[in-house]
Amino acid sequence: MIAVRKKSVEDSSLKKIVIEDVEEVVSETFSLNELINDSVEDPSNSKKVTPIDEEIILDPKKYILSKTDTKGIIEYGNDYFVEIAGYDEEDLIGKNHNIIRHPDMPKVVFQLLWQRISNRQNITAVVKNMAKDGRYYWVVTDFEIKVDKVTNEITGYFAYRTAAPKKAVVAMEPLYKKLISIEKVSGMDGSGKYLNALLEAENKTYDQFINEVTGKNSTMMRLLFAAMKKLFR
Ligand SMILES: Cc1cc2nc3c(=O)[nH]c(=O)nc-3n(C[C@H](O)[C@H](O)[C@H](O)COP(=O)(O)O)c2cc1C
């Protein structure tokens, strides 16, 4: 069981949630297997990337697009994706998308992502990714399913990304840190419960929360994402 004490802080335009404390009441002893390994090594990668504390500033007018198969294996990336990730295109195609996973990302975010898209529901997430040289970049990502019109089966997934607004990073960075610290002790079970408790305390769904912190409901963001998707389809 997790008890959450929270206070709300007005931060100019954004109502930010600051988690003051989490009390984990651990009734069982967790086995070592439940500890999260923070390694970002991809089995298909021979070299491990070491994160460095340097941000890649994204062009707000450009978008990063990738397409995967049903297992998250990259089938396509646009030029900006290849440029920012810093890999040669041939090093990205055929690899799992976790090739650019940053260790600062909690696993529960990807668990939620897969739960949603495998159930044919789109989802938006704020993601910190890692380039080949270890630098990071923050994006707002719309994940969408691709369905075969004839068989109605899922054939793959799209990810449309734009630079994350500062307010989204300010809101998500401390939350992700907290989720990771919980995951180190009690795995995704604990971080999932924490996230749910937080949303419940705020009386918001995950989608409402994300739309609020990213400003995705704003006309500008909606137009941007709509234009991006139209360009590709
Ligand atoms: C369309 C699509 C795009 C994805 N994009 C990213 C991404 O940009 N960064 C990332 O870390 N994971 C991304 N993922 C999720 C990864 O495939 C993987 O589940 C995640 O990185 C967690 O890695 P792990 O299972 O090694 O912990 C994407 C998945 C899909 C289906």
Image (cartoon, rainbow, N blue to C red):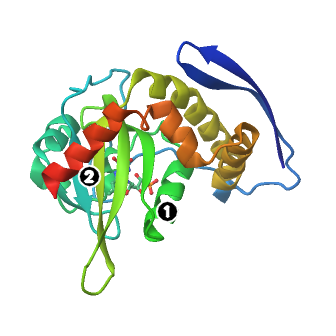
Looking at the rendering, which quadrant does residue 174 occupy? top right
Residue highlighted by disc 2: 46
Q: Is residue 226 above or below residue 61?
A: below
Q: Is residue 170 above or below residue 146?
A: above
Q: Residues within 10 Å of mark 1 (few under 14, many from 20)?
A: some
Q: In terms of sequence position, does the residue under pointer 2 or pointer 1 come before the other?
A: 2
Q: Secondary structure at mark 1?
A: helix
Residue 123, horizontal then vertical, whole percent: 44, 54
Please state the horizontal and vertical placement of residue 165, each as a whole percent of the image.
38, 26
Report the residue that reaches farthest toward the bottom. 151
Q: Amino acid at mark 2?
A: Ser
Neighbourhood count class around disc 2 (C-alpha, 10 Å): few under 14, some 14–19, many 20 upward: few
Residue 167 placement (x, y as % from top left): 47, 23
Q: Is residue 209 above or below residue 146?
A: above
Q: Is residue 91 visible?
A: no
Amino acid on which disc 1 is placed:
Arg
> Pointer 1: what residue?
116
Residue found 28% across the figure and 43% down from its top: 225
Q: Is residue 163 left or right of residue 19?
A: left
Residue shown at 65% from the left, 58% from the top: 33
The residue at the point 48 percent across, 53 percent down is 110
Q: Is residue 159 shown to the viewer in this render?
A: yes
Q: CA distance from mark 2 to mark 1?
A: 31 Å
Against 170, is 4 above or below? below
In this rendering, position of residue 233 left or right of residue 204: left
Q: Residue furthest front?
A: 219
